Amino acid sequence: MSKKGVVALLIGINAILLTALLLCAVRLPVAQAQAAPLAANYLMVAGEINDDHDALYILDLAARLMFVMEIDRTQHNLVLLDRRNLQADFRAGG
């Protein structure tokens, strides 16, 4: 095999490897969810208040309450920021 043939073969192999790498790296992450049994009427969602602060939103589905908590990074614990009554906020009729 000539020198040009070996170079062409190596370029082809590198192109195939690069394509395979890009196909594996570009996959979007899969979001998975599970149905909660009725006894566990809580839902927790992580969110962002602003660029520097993350929040944890806890929904009590049975009592229709939402709690907003933030991590106190100095004490390393959760701090309750607010509590909302979702039934009153959305004026649900029942």
Image (tube, rainbow, N blue to C red):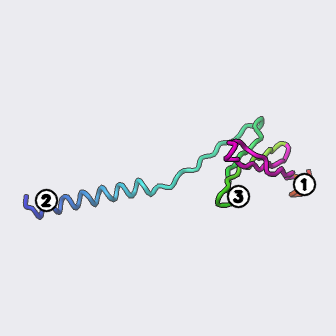
Element assignment for label 3 = strand
Residues drawn in magenta? 63-86
Which of pointers 3 and 1 indicates the residue nearer the eye?
3
Query: Front-most of 42 and 72?
Result: 72
Which of pointers 3 and 2 indicates the residue nearer the eye?
3
Which amino acid type corresponds to the residue marked 2 in the rendered image?
Val
The residue carrying pointer 2 sits among few (fewer than 14), some (14 to 19) or many (20 or more) residues within 10 Å by Cα, namely few
Residue 55 percent location from the top left of the image: 70, 51
Q: Which residue is mark 2?
A: 6
Outermost top residue: 39
Q: Residue at x 77, y 35 (%)?
A: 39
Mark 3 or mark 1: name the one nearer the start of the chain. Answer: 3
Q: Which residue is mark 3?
A: 49
Which amino acid type corresponds to the residue marked 3 in the rendered image?
Ile
Taking the magenta stretch, the answer to whether it contains residue 49 is: no
Q: CA distance from mark 3 to mark 1?
A: 23 Å
Mark 3 or mark 2: name the one nearer the start of the chain. Answer: 2
Residue 66 percent location from the top left of the image: 80, 49
Q: CA distance from mark 2 to mark 1?
A: 74 Å
In-image side of 32 versus 15 (left or right): right
Q: Determine the image quadrant of residue 7.
A: bottom left
Q: Determine the image quadrant of residue 75.
A: top right
Q: CA distance from mark 3 to mark 2?
A: 57 Å
In-image side of 69 versus 92 (left or right): left
Q: Decide whether the magenta segment is chiefly helix, strand or loop.
A: strand
Q: Which residue is mark 1?
A: 88
Q: Residue at x 83, y 50 (%)?
A: 83
Taking the magenta stretch, the answer to whether it contains residue 81 is: yes
The residue carrying pointer 1 sits among few (fewer than 14), some (14 to 19) or many (20 or more) residues within 10 Å by Cα, namely few
In-image side of 3 versus 72 (left or right): left
Element assignment for label 1 = helix
Height in image: 42 above or below 47? above
